[in-house]
Image: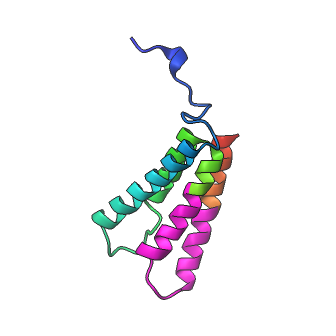
């Protein structure tokens, strides 16, 4: 039988602001990047599709500061590996939407 008292969704699994939390968030983003590149390397239409769940998972497991780290690492990974080399207004718009969405997600989960 599942012990309901051990199911905590309101506190992170790892100690917030610890080295383990930041390393876990980084590993989650690396896995999301590799999965995104493996599944569909040429689709730049939805560059942040796999990073939304990565930021959510990192925030739930590691806290809001590691969630923000996951957000910044996701943006860097998308710009380096997924988005086309030429900077366009669509890329900037998608990055802005991702940033606003993930800041909202991290703020709501971390509250």
Image quarter for residue 47? bottom left
Residue at x 53% of width, y 78% of height: 91
Residue at image position (48%, 88%) is 86
Residue 54 falls within the magenta-colored stretch: no
Q: Is residue 110 left or right of residue 51?
A: right
**Image quadrant in which you'd find residue 50:** bottom left
The residue lying at 57 percent from left, 30 percent from top is: 9
Which residues are drawn in magenta? 70-99
Q: Nearer the viewer, residue 71 or 47?
A: 71
Question: For this rendering, which residue is in front, 42 or 35?
Answer: 35
Rendering coords of residue 90 (x, y %):
53, 80
The location of residue 84, given as percent across then percent down, is: 43, 82
Dominant SS type (magenta): helix
User: Hey, which residue is sitting farthest right in the picture?
Assistant: 111
Residue 80 magenta-highlighted: yes
Examine the image and state in which quarter residue 111 appears. Answer: top right
């Amino acid at each position: 039988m599942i012990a309901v008292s051990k199911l905590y969704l309101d506190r992170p699994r790892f100690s917030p602001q610890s080295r383990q939390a930041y390393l876990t968030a980084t590993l989650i983003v690396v896995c999301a990047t590799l999965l995104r590149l493996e599944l569909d390397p040429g689709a730049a239409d939805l560059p942040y599709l796999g990073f939304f769940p990565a930021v959510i998972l990192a925030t739930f497991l590691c806290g809001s500061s590691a969630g923000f780290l996951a957000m910044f690492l996701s943006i860097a990974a998308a710009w380096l590996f997924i988005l086309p080399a030429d900077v366009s207004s669509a890329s900037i718009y998608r990055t802005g939407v991702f940033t606003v969405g993930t800041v909202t997600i991290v703020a709501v989960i971390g509250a």
